[in-house]
Amino acid sequence: MVEPPLDSVPEADIYVVGRTDRVLSESITEIEERTEDGSGLVVMGREGLRPDRYDSLDISDVGDLEKTDVEVREPVRASVSNTSVLSVSSGQGSSLSRPRRALLRFSHGDGEVLLFNMNSSDFGPSFVYPVFWKRVFQDMVERQEIPDLNRETGSTLNSTRIELPSGQERSGFVRMRSPGIYNASGGLYAANLESRDESVDETDIPPDRSQSTTVKTERNLQSVAAVALAVLVLGELAALRRLGEL
């Protein structure tokens, strides 16, 4: 960890800009450029936050701090009571909490930005607090490649929250049975194959029952023929014995 102001911005997988005015605009610009190239950025919300300094934050109309209860929904579930949340208006960012403005996530190029807009000391005592940061950082630095986000129908997803193409929400392991977009906490996944044949796993194809029935019928007929032949031979032997030829 380095203290601002910085002579130069070090290379890092994740940058955390705390509640301070000492970070130079030039440094923020360079950090955002690194984020655009794939790094992660966490901005701690505070009074006096200037969104005009951050191209990566789609927020405006920053107001005062308000006391409210917060329900953290992703990437873990937790309740934070009577914490301070900065009043902001946001556009395209997605939310990890309720109310929406408490935890806002934005895509920025190949990287991701999180506005942590609550008092960390109120969330800190929770036993899931370190788990929250661990998973946030993993999501930021382990962004999947596009081929990994395109799945075959029948494959599974595992996430704390998954919105199905039908609009229903699930959690845990979900099988992607229907083609469409699956909105998970780790990103958007697509299951949309061109033809029905492509979406069929050959290992899941049931055996051809008509073929097995035909084989079984042929075997039964062969057995019946063999028995009939044996009966015919025994019959001839009996007739010859009666005629005295044996």
Image (cartoon, grey):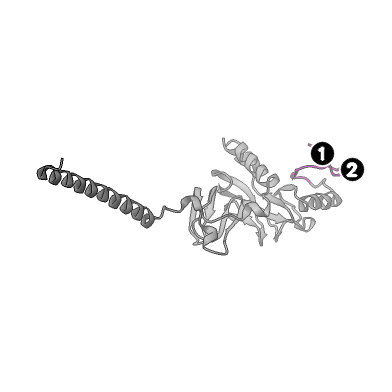
- The residue carrying mark 2 is 7
**Percent x, y of residue 48:** 75, 52
Taking the spot 62% from the left edge, 37% from the top edge, the residue there is: 130
- The residue carrying mark 1 is 3
Please rate how many residues cluster around mark 1, counting C-alpha atoms within 10 Å: few if below 14, some from 14 to 19, many from 20.
Answer: few
Q: Amino acid at mark 1?
A: Glu
Figure quadrant of the N terminus: top right
Q: Is residue 183 above or below residue 10?
A: below
Left or right: where does residue 168 sit relative to residue 8?
A: left
What segment is highlighted magenta in the picture? 1-20
Is residue 237 among the parts visible in the rendering? Answer: yes
Dot 1 falls on a residue whose secondary structure is: loop
Q: Which mark is residue 137?
A: none
Kindly give the residue lying farthest to the front in the view shown: 245
**Percent x, y of residue 176:** 51, 55
Q: Residue 17 lies in magenta, yes or no?
A: yes
Left or right: where does residue 228 sit relative to residue 158?
A: left
**Percent x, y of residue 97:** 58, 51
